[in-house]
Amino acid sequence: MLLAAWMMNRRSLLLALSSTLALGGCLRPDFRTAQLDATATGSIGGRYTLATGDRLRVIVFGQDNLSNIYAIDGTGGIAMPLIGLVKVGGQSTAQAARTIEAKLAAGFVREPHVTVEVDAYRPFYILGEVTTSGQYPYVNGMAVETAVAIAAGFGPRAARDYAVLTREGPNGLVSGIVPMTYLVRPGDTIVIKERFF
């Protein structure tokens, strides 16, 4: 009799626990975007800082042999004729133009005028419950849902109302739970989680 009561209580406990876990999987976690927002979310604009993987169009007026497209390497620099390696990682395009002008003015070109534009942004990464995870070219103004579409859509067990986004902040990597309409920036890593029901 005591054993039967204990088995019944155990079954009730297991049933209640499994119901709670199943319902918990239906709930979306609270969005946590404050730290990500502090890393300059939104349109790229003037706040964009250059980093490894970006391709730059550098125009040196009157110097066609120096005007070209340069890729930022792993050290945060670009290799240009005459002046060699120029560190531009962590700078805006305007700051990079001033840096290049200063190097050119140091005995190579008299009164150089330089313009720097981003030719191609560094890629973003999407992992988890999508059809084709991997690295993809960044599209300006894209949201998480656009990134999922680029990765050929959700997997069959994907949580479809939130994602975990990680990006490089001023003090290292920052992660947060974001809605599907959250704007993605170059270099971001998006993880689509699995739902639990």
Image (spheres, rainbow, N blue to C red):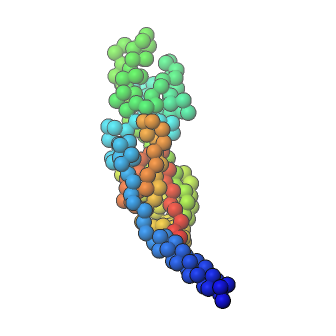
Asked if 9 appears above or below 63 in the picture, the reply is below
- Residue 23: x percent and y percent? 47, 74
Q: Nearer the viewer, residue 52 or 159?
A: 159
For the point 43% across and 62% down, the residue is: 29
Using the rendered image of the protein, determine whether residue 119 is visible from the camera's viewpoint: yes
- Residue 22: x percent and y percent? 51, 74
For the point 34% across and 15% down, the residue is: 111
The quadrant where residue 98 appears? top left
Q: Nearer the viewer, residue 128 or 56?
A: 128
The quadrant where residue 118 appears? top left
For the point 43% across and 52% down, the residue is: 176
Identify the residue at the far front of this view.
2
Asked if 121 appears above or below 22 in the picture, the reply is above
Using the rendered image of the protein, determine whether residue 197 is visible from the camera's viewpoint: no
Q: Nearer the viewer, residue 69 or 128?
A: 128
Q: Nearer the viewer, residue 129 or 102?
A: 129
- Residue 152: x percent and y percent? 51, 64
For the point 55% across and 60% down, the residue is: 128
Asked if 7 appears above or below 187 in the picture, the reply is below
Is 138 on the left-hand or right-hand side of 10? left
The quadrant where residue 18 appears? bottom right
